[in-house]
Image (cartoon, helix red, strand yellow):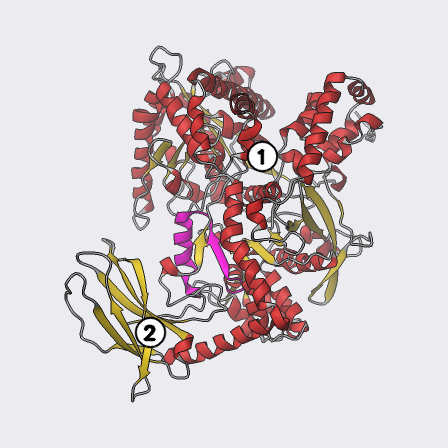
Amino acid sequence: MFGTRFTLEVRPRIPKKLERLRALADNLLYSWDRRVRGLFYRLDHELWHSSNHSPKVFLRRISQRRLEDAAEDRVFMEEYSRVCSAFDSYMQEHVQSDVRLLFDPKRDMVAYFCLEFGFHESLPLYSGGLGILAGDHCKAASDLGLPFVAVGLLYRQGYFTQTIDNHGSQIAHYTPTHFEDLPISPARDAEGREVHVHLDLPGRQIEIKVWRAQAGRISLYLLDTDLDVNAEQDRRITYQLYGGDENVRIQQELVLGVGGTRALRALGIQPTVWHTNEGHAAFLILERCRECHGAGMSFDAALEFVAAHTVFTTHTPVSAGHDVFDHDTIKHYFKDQLGGYGTTLERLLELGSSPGNQGSFNMTALALRGSRFHNGVSKIHGQVASRMEGYCWPQIPHAENPLGYITNGVHVPTFLALQWSSLFDLQFSAEWRNQLLNHEYWQRLDDIPDHNFWSVRQLLKSELLTDVRRRAIRRHRRNGCSEAQIERLTRFLSPDHTDTLILGFARRFATYKRATLLFQDPERLARLLNDPHRPVVLIFAGKAHPQDLPGQQLIHTIHEYSMRPEFEGRIVLLEGYDLALARKMVVGVDVWINTPEYPLEACGTSGEKAGINGVLNLSVLDGWWGEAFNGSNGWGITPHDPHLDLAVRNREEGRELMDLLEQEVAPLYFDRDGHGFSEGWIERSKNSMKTLIPQYNSQRMVMDYVMQYYGPANLQYQTLRAAGGEPASRLAEWKKRIAAAWPHVTIRRLDQARDFILAGDALPLDVAVHLGELTADDVVVECLIGRDQENGEFTIQSHFPLHKTATNEQGETLFHLELTPNLPGLQHYMVRVYPYHELLSSPFEMGCMIWL
């Protein structure tokens, strides 16, 4: 057809009886409350899907007739009333008692900064795991009633959508977002004025508009530079997530850290705890130091005050996940601002220094030095990160340095399938929703009859197969496949084929995640998938970053395998991986496969989403699975020594993966024993849910942050802000004195070491410490009792402080202890000295320690 194509949207008038649909559409609570989403679905399920599950778009396009019919439909109106009542009750709930012990909602506030937020596919501000985790963190904070705000960027394009062509090449599509389609509105100050803040960039000033999204009981503030008053180059700063060059990236991070801080100030929000989720937002540390310096503090005192109530979470041990800028870039953006900070360029660059990046500025290093509470996101990752970032505390053993861990969790109301929620309501009543942290409560999953449990699992699989078949047919038709070929490629995806064992692998395609580990022995894999008595289908989904060519090659390789005759229909590669597809896959497959290169999987929360739905994990024992696997809730692949050649590790771990699939997974699944289902499989599946639901959920995660980090950081804020920040200044001066004197501190033993003592006797310990300009009050001298491990590491079991007794003629301070070991047999002990001050957030934060 010729001529111009015009578009016209005929918008309905919402009947007065249904006017609260607008409020429901404007609160992201719909992203985790199925009852809210269900209202829109019941009005017009086809429009709900075609509008990308966006309530705002849906309400603009639904027919007037449907709304009017619904307003007169007694059944619909009863459900509408129940949803509105539940919404009101949720919004009015009080802060949970455990939170109130540490936070006064009228005084205290956590501000959470992240470069991406994944609440729902209708708000495309995420690329993958970091964003989904941030969204789950916000949802759990809302559920708990934590005084909490979040800050991010409002992207005009967001992340890309993906198609895969008939050659297996990933095609990235960027579609600008219309902000009127999003559940956001301009943020306003106390006088009702739109909030705009300014940011100085070299040679110019840019304006930032602040938007607000309501997410349950918390607010998400989003920063936007795409304004007419800004130059074209500055309008594009917030155009695309993870797009552009180094200059665009540092500008985005300045907008987030500096602009985000100024936005909160303009809104009248005064956080008492600041949480930077990854290093992208670490410039907020410098901005707050600038504020403190403007109020009269020295830079060092300001840094102590700011760091004392800042939390930093690092999410990856992969070097590419840590932003590093060269010194010239930092100089370019900060040289004209130094006067406002009260420091030198050299001091500023020092905050971002790291051994592996000489001449560069590491945002992770800045985040670590500008915070006093730091964590990785699983036990294994915490250990890895404490070694990676140990340069910040050079004399402290990695196991004791201040970088700890809180294992990520997933938001159960978001990712638990509707069918499970309905079954739990029937079996346990609605009380189960209040028991998400109660381990003992979830043992009652054993009370669910096996046939009911199996029916839910099969129904979820059937729905997945329906969706996968639809997606696969659409892709193959677009790519020009014949109908006969499409039939071959989708013949095992019938919703009636629920007796097929479905294996799922869906995540970002990065090389360290080893998506092709299953293809180490293609002939063996073909035998497994094509066993006529034990049919198996393997479904892949995921995206690679547009600049990650090796990651895109993984997609190409999987596509080629999926088109080989022996794998046609048995290996399925899906395009367009997003939250909607993820929700289908994590509940519908039978086995969730994860094969990262140990120890590079920081956490891996997709497996948690699967496990809470009774899907069994088959994963390398890395990330969260390294601490969750107990032998009866899935299967674990033992990682080989990471120092071995990668090809050897791939071969050996690929072999173990196939051994487990052939010898344990498939036999257990198809062991029906005359019941029509596998009792052993159901037992393991129930064990997965019992293990994961109360432990690996985001409410537990956020409560861990509250107890271990937010609460202590809030207390430090109250302590160091007293008397106009005098304690912060005192601490800064003490640290300066320690740093100058510490190189001259020495320790030596005065008594003669003994080989043994008799039970009940004491071992006298006498040491002399040369303190120089320091005093005994500046240090702790202690004896550690422990065990030597096979790997040569010393495991501490007890601490005993030594006490000052005198000063000798050489000017050394003498310390003494009558040591009475509390364990029998062969023991080991060590003596050390380190600086200590009552205002420290962590006893080892200075990184100074000397051993005898």
Q: Nearer the viewer, residue 230 or 549?
A: 230
Q: What secondary structure is found at the residue carrying circle 1?
A: helix
Pointer 1 local density, CA inside 10 Å: few below 14, some 14–19, many at least 20: many
Residue 379 shown in magenta: yes
Circle on res. 293? none
Which residue is tagged 2?
803
User: The C terminus appears in which quarter of the rendering?
Assistant: bottom left
Q: Nearer the viewer, residue 399 or 247?
A: 399
Task: Inspect this view and state whether residue 548 appears.
Answer: no
Question: Which residue reaches farthest bottom?
Answer: 809
Q: Nearer the viewer, residue 368 or 203?
A: 368
The amino acid sitting under disc 1 is Leu
Question: Residue 226 appears at what percent x and percent y?
Answer: 74, 51
Pointer 2 local density, CA inside 10 Å: few below 14, some 14–19, many at least 20: some
Q: State the extent of the magenta-drawn residues as a range.
A: 369-392
Sooner in the amino-acid sequence: mark 2 or mark 1:
1
